[in-house]
Amino acid sequence: MLLCRIVGRAVATHSHPSLDGFKMLLCQQEDADGTPLDDPPFVAIDLFGAGVHQRVFVSTDGIGARGIVRDEHSPVRCFVQGVIDDQQP
């Protein structure tokens, strides 16, 4: 599981049929303090309606992601597992 911030949306004119109906987000991994890591952004499918600039947990479990899209041959590997509530008590 990775701590990330949503930095954009991914749009494809052609994609694997298993991704039809799924929103794809561009995720930048960051540390606990919110500092972006040097790794490049990556694409994850979204199940929770996360928006740009929100912090999220992303799973890199490809088998789990392929189970979500119900296609064992799908190229999907990452999915948003949860949105982090940044509100202070």
Image (cartoon, rainbow, N blue to C red):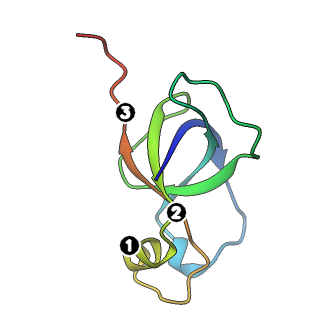
Q: Which type of secondary structure does the marked residue at label 2 adopt?
A: loop
Q: Which residue is mark 3?
A: 84
- 16 sits to left or right of 64: right
The residue shown at (60%, 34%) is: 30
Mark closer to the chain start, 1 or 3: 1
Q: What amino acid does circle 1 point to?
A: Ile
The answer to the question of whether label 1 and label 3 lie on touching residues, with beta carbons closer than 8 A, is no
- 29 sits to left or right of 50: right
The residue shown at (67%, 30%) is: 36
Q: Nearer the viewer, mark 1 or mark 3?
A: 3
In front here: 18 or 37?
A: 37
Q: Nearer the viewer, mark 2 or mark 1?
A: 2
The residue shown at (40%, 82%) is: 70
In the rendered image, residue 51, in percent from the top left (x then y), is placed at 48, 35
- Distance from disc 2 to disc 1, alpha carbons, whole Å, reads 13 Å
Q: Which type of secondary structure does the marked residue at label 3 adopt?
A: loop
- 82 sits to left or right of 56: left
Mark closer to the chain start, 2 or 3: 2
- 74 sits to left or right of 57: right
Q: Which residue is mark 1?
A: 68
Q: Which residue is mark 2?
A: 60
> Residue 65 appears in which quarter of the rendering?
bottom left
